Amino acid sequence: MTEEREGAAAVHEATGTAERVGAEGAFSRHRTRTESADHAGPDGPADVVVAEDVIDDEQPEHEHLSAVPPADEKQRPRRRGPGPFALIVAPSLLALIGVSGYLALTGGLSPDQSEGSEPAQTSVANVDASYVPWLRKAAEACTVVTPSLLAAQIDQLSGWSNDSASLSQQGIAGFTDAQWRTWGRDDNSNGRSSPRDPEDAIMALGRQDCSLAEKVTGLRTEGTVSGNLVDLTLAAYTVGTDTVKQAGRVPADARTFLEKVKARLPRYDALVRRNPEQNGGQNAAAILTHPVGTLTVTSSFGSRTHPLTGVTKLHTGVDFGAPQGAQVSAARDGRIEFAGTTSAYGIRVVIDHGTIGGKRLQTTYSHLSALQVTAGQTVTAGSPIGLVGSTGLSTGPHLHFEVLLDGQYMDPLPWLSTAR
């Protein structure tokens, strides 16, 4: 009997030893796989190894150390340490989430990854700088309305597109027929008054806004309303002066339009600053004498459809109607930079007038019938330089006159003195 117990004990001890050896081997293999994962390169099988370790780690830790615990030991759950997922994968995921959140908040995501930029943010690129002189001129009627405010308002109304989805509202400023009868004029002198002519629309909106600004200024002076005059003017444009008067301030219905317009102001402030063609005002820029005897505008500066080519693009100067052979004179002292023939402009003269406010000023005279100067010659204001003609791409005798400031085309009319 004693020998049987001793034999059984020996078998039990041998079995336990074998199980411990097997468990230790499993633990050793587990450690080897983990170390291999730790040393795996970016292109190695680290992901696969970690996945196996996670599966292994689902078992309680003591099962790796002893397959058969002593019978007299009370089973107690042992605290598990952090597995490879917690040590490697989880911190990486948290870091990725944090970086993505930061980029989304700061605009670091590309348009394809985010919801996309508001169309108005790119609309400045669609606005030709040739409209800036018209925006300045339209804002001259009052101090409340600025060129950039008009530009931002047009942006909000139409995105500077003439293709309105509304049948009742036309052009970039969205005028109705009734509104146009009140505010519209032929400001670009092309023989028609149309809300679809951007120059006419800009000037008409300036007149309308300045009228509203005058009304709300009076209401604020009387104490009927309170608030910023620009805000009140935009509110009156949106919901009407009477509604603003009843509210005594900017009505809630007008705030969305107002906020969207004002959000666009900084980009148009920058656009106006980049085009300082008037050097602080029309009077300061009126430094050129008349290039022909009578300034009869037959085609104004700005976007137009060319009468011969049919292409719609910027008309880079202003056309003055004059009879064949009429005298053409230099608009300011300078040096003849070019005097010759070109395919499109015909016989052409370019004069360099030096710098004005640190910017190079040039004037051009095109479609001449004859030259009276040569390149390199110095001229004074009023000196004869050529004769009116119809050479090049032209439909009849006229002078095509241009003003360039640092190589950029400007509307010539504000630069011309009212005195002959």
Image (tube, helix red, strand yellow):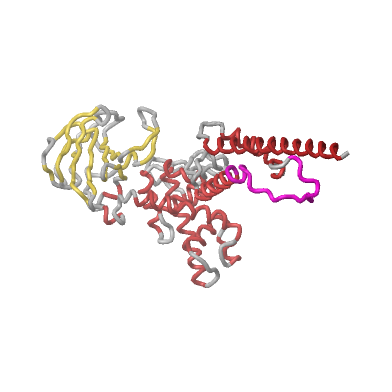
Q: Position of residue 8 (x, y in %)?
A: 82, 37
Q: Is residue 340 left or right of residue 211?
A: left
Residue nearest the viewer, comparing 132 with 206:
132
SS assignment for the magenta stretch, majority: loop
Q: Classify the position of the N terminus by image quarter.
A: top right
Residue nearest the viewer, comparing 283 with 150:
150
Is residue 71 magenta-colored?
A: yes
Residue 87 placement: quadrant: top right
In this view, 76 is above or below 84: below
The residue at 25%/52% (across/down) is 417
**Residue range highlighted in magenta:** 67-89
Q: Position of residue 381 (x, y in %)?
A: 16, 47
In this view, 151 is above or below 221: above
The residue at 62%/37% (across/down) is 28
Q: Is residue 332 left or right of residue 1?
A: left
Q: Is residue 149 left or right of residue 35?
A: left
Residue 155, visible in the rendered structure: yes
Is residue 222 magenta-colored?
A: no
Q: Is residue 222 left or right of residue 10?
A: left
Q: Position of residue 285 (x, y in %)?
A: 27, 53
Residue nearest the viewer, comparing 124 with 198:
124
Residue sitting at the far right: 1
The residue at 31%/39% (across/down) is 316
